[in-house]
Every structure is written in structure tokens, then in C-alpha cells.
Amino acid sequence: MEPILKVNHLKKVFHQRGKRDVFAVENISFSLQPGEILGIVGESGSGKSTVAKLITRLVDPTEGEIILDGQDITHLKGTALKDAYGKLQMVFQNPVGSFDPRRTLGDGIGESLRNKGMSKVERRKKAAELLEQCGLDASYADRYPHQVSGGQCQRAAIARALAVDPKVLICDEATSALDVTVQKRIIELLRRLKEEKNLSYLFICHNLALVQEFCDRVLVMKDGGIVEEGTPDDVICNPQDEYTKMLVEAVL
């Protein structure tokens, strides 16, 4: 089976005037299979979020290639990149901050549909359907981000990501700002949506217990590189790398 996402020798160097270069990501290679949940763990500054920004092309890579559903998207720009976003979407850590505070959740969810030429009536209907799929009443389309809880806003953010029927969802610490009960419900929602829509997830997280419960495979990152990979049970219960051992011991 061909991977839905493949990253080859990805590297990102941030050049700072008058300062030393920062090697944020160094020679990273991995693949994501259709229907797989791949976890990426590591401490703050390990390069996890930079990997997400590189794959979604929010940041340009210094070297390497990103293959999405058989297409090289490493250097895409403009309309070609927008087309790629039809297959790849991201759910961010701060759901409230990811919406425009001056516009309703329904507007936010319908934005990508408007770009595709969908009429206002059709967008409203689709936004209502997506909200209901994500466990919210259709009336939430008329609410503003500050009028809902963090968990409700994250459900709306997931609905927005699903609007274009993507194949890959990147969750960048998507549950870390939520309390444990809400986090559990969001994970249940993601699990159900994966089955219903045959989604693949790149799940970036610092919560090892959550990764062990939710992911099929896990990569451990340190200083911009991958130091260990395997099934969550193997990596967490029998870590081989000293850094992974330290991460596991820190939560025991």
C-alpha cells in the first residue's frame, strides 16, 4: 500500500542575522499509511510543531521533499498549494485563536467552501451538517468563538478542517488546552470520524498516555531529529533510546 503522506530527508534551518543558525528540523524521514494514526512526541523545542508547519507549507523547507497522495507538494505555491489543502488540513492547539473573532463559527467553517464557489445557502447547510457530525447543534453556526467553550470551539475547528473532505488531518497539540474529560470526548470524536471518513492522522502530542491509547505508531523527536520509532507499546513500555527513557520516566 502506498503511503498517503511521505516525508523524505526534511530539514529546516532558520537563519538569524548576526546570530547562529537554528537547525529546527534535521534530516527527518517517515511515512503515514492510509487510515493510520501516527503520533509524534518530544519535549517543547524538539521540532514537532515545525514538522507540522513544514508539511502544511506554513513554513518553507530548507531541504527534503513532502509527498502527499503521490504528489510532490514541497515547493507548491498559489492555486496548486490551495488544491493540496483539499487533501490536508490542520487542527491547532488554540481553537479560539484559530477562528476570526469578528466572524461566526459558521462563517469560519464555510470559508474554504466559499473559495470553492459554493453559494451562501449551500455553505450554511454544509456547516450545519459538519457541526452535527462533530457533536454540536447546528445553531452553533451563529455563535462567535468567544461565546463557546474550548471543547466546543475545538469541535467547530475539526468541522472546519473536514469541510474540504481531506485525507490527512494534522492535529498539533489539538487536545492539550482542554481538560481531561473534554479531551477524552475529542479523542472519541476523532476516532469515530477516522472510521467514518477513512482519515489518516498525524497526531502531535506531549501526553504519552494519550498517544499510547490513541496512536498506531509513534515517532520520538529530540533536537529536530527522530531518535526512536515503533508501536506505542514498544516505545513507551520498552524504550531503547536514553532520551525516550527519560520522557517515559518523567510521567511515571
Image: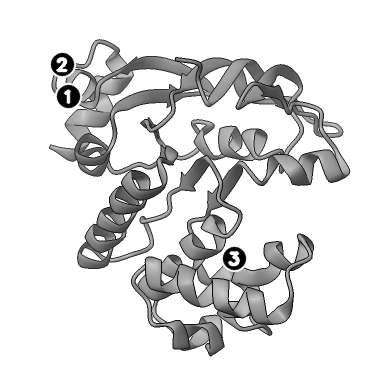
Q: CA distance from mark 2 to mark 3?
A: 37 Å
Quadrant where the image shows the N terminus:
top left
Nearest to the eye among marks 2 and 1: give it: 1
**At 17% across and 24% down in the image, what residue appears?**
233
Residue 94, visible in the rendered structure: no
Q: Label 1 amino acid? A: Asp
Q: Residues within 10 Å of mark 1 (few under 14, many from 20)?
A: some
What's the colour scheme? Answer: one colour
Taking the spot 24% from the left edge, 44% from the top edge, the residue there is: 210
User: Which disc, if any, is residue 233?
Assistant: 1
Give SS at disc 1: helix
The mark found on residue 215 in the picture is none
> Could you say which disc has been placed on residue 238 in the image?
2
- Of mark 1 and mark 3, the one earlier in the sequence is 3
Residues tagged 2 and 1 counted as in contact (Cβ below 8 A): yes
Assign the C terminus to one quadrant of the image: top left
Counting the numbered discs, the total is: 3
Q: Position of residue 46 (x, y in %)?
A: 49, 31
Left/right placement of residue 130 relative to residue 180 reads right
65 vs 244, left or right, is right
Q: Position of residue 241 (x, y in %)?
A: 29, 12
Q: Residue at x 78, y 40 (%)?
A: 81
Q: Amino acid at mark 3?
A: Ser
Give the secondary structure at mark 3: helix
Residue 98's tag is: 3
